[in-house]
Image: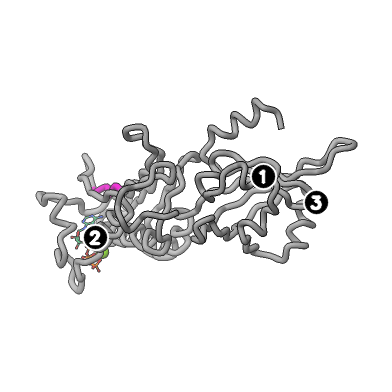
Amino acid sequence: MLREQAALLDLTHDTVFVRDEQDVITYWNRGAQELYGWTRAEAIGSVAHVRMRTVFPAPFPEIMAELTRTGRWEGELVHTRRDGTPVVVASRWSLRRGAPGRVPAVLETNNDTIVAEVLPLVRPELRRHGIALRMTLAENLPAVLGDRIQLQQVLINLLVNAAEAMRDVPAERRRLVVAGARETIEDDDWAGITVEDGGVGLGDLEAERLFEPFYSTKPGGLGMGLSISRSIVESHGGRLWATANPDHGATFHLALPGVSSPPSGPSTVQA
Ligand SMILES: Nc1ncnc2c1ncn2[C@@H]1O[C@H](COP(=O)(O)OP(=O)(O)OP(=O)(O)O)[C@@H](O)[C@H]1O
Ligand SMILES: [Mg+2]
């Protein structure tokens, strides 16, 4: 790979690596180092799918057959990081056919999927309530370390609350916007995720009230969703808060430190 190309690949927060015919890693960008935890020197020369204990969504020969036939493959993989924690990634492979005398190589680009995974779980519910969903996730959203199930639970809570807040509003206000962007705070990268709805909004209520345990305006509501969500987020070194939209509805803001800027909370310390 050209030096210039390699420098460019280090700028992206995507995980990018190259592996040869024998599945041996020959290039490993900074994003890969951040997500998986192995340095370039440690990764290069090792067998990719042994090192990362890759779990494939289909039999490996089938995947390779598709890659060889079309030059591309896309799917979801489970990898294991250096510290032993699993990560689910959306993976894209492209085959670099060897020029005469050069071995073919595979360029693999992986994105952490913590937000993308949640949407299929809530989509049917949203559809049932006639809620339109728009999602924009920046390509350079930093990877986040933590308990995936817990963090997904937070997002599900926010999405369910938003859907409930829109139950009785006119149809044209039933829209949900989920956006993910990279934010730089004092030189550290954060993943900022907002969930914006067109629902009943906060009225005169101070936004902080919503996060109090047992605060609920719903018949049968426990009022625990937001308070639990906030404690999960804070145990990951992050923040969760709400603001009123200028017109209708509310926006919930979730900020989580990216892997390149480890938080100081004791429960989030990972090797
Ligand atoms: N998107 C939203 N728009 C307007 N109000 C909201 C929104 N999300 C939450 N709230 C208000 O905050 C309250 C607390 O939310 P929380 O998720 O903690 O509890 P809940 O949804 O009432 O019950 P549960 O424990 O089942 O989640 C809700 O009852 C509602 O009044
Ligand atoms: Mg709730």
Earlier in the chain: of badge 1 and badge 3, it is 1
Q: Which mark, residue 44?
A: 1
Q: Residue at x 53, y 32 (%)?
A: 11
How far apart in space, not on screen, are marks 1 and 3 (Cα)? 23 Å
Q: Quadrant of the N terminus?
A: top right
Q: Is mark 3 within 8 Å of ligand 1?
A: no
**Residue at the outermost right position:** 100
- Residue type at mark 3 is Thr
Tell me which image quadrant ligand 1 sits in.
Answer: bottom left
Q: Is residue 101 above or below residue 243?
A: above
- Which residue is nearer to you in this view: 202 or 259? 259
- Which residue is nearer to you in this view: 121 or 6? 6
- Which residue is nearer to you in this view: 71 or 146? 146
- List x then y, in percent, for residue 201: 20, 51
Q: Is mark 2 within 8 Å of ligand 1?
A: yes
- List x then y, in percent, for residue 239: 27, 49
- List x then y, in percent, for residue 269: 37, 54
How far apart in space, not on screen, are marks 1 and 2 (Cα)? 44 Å
Asked which secondary structure carries label 2, the reply is helix
**Residue position for label 2:** 226
Q: Which residues are magenta?
A: 249-253
Quadrant of residue 119 within the rendered picture: bottom left
Apparent side of residue 198 relative to residue 269 in the rendered image (left or right): left
Earlier in the chain: of badge 1 and badge 2, it is 1
Q: Residue at x 53, y 55 (%)?
A: 82
- Residue type at mark 1 is Ile
Asked which secondary structure carries label 3, the reply is helix
**Residue position for label 3:** 68
Q: Main secondary structure of the magenta part?
A: strand
Q: Are marks 1 and 3 in contact (CB under 8 Å)?
A: no
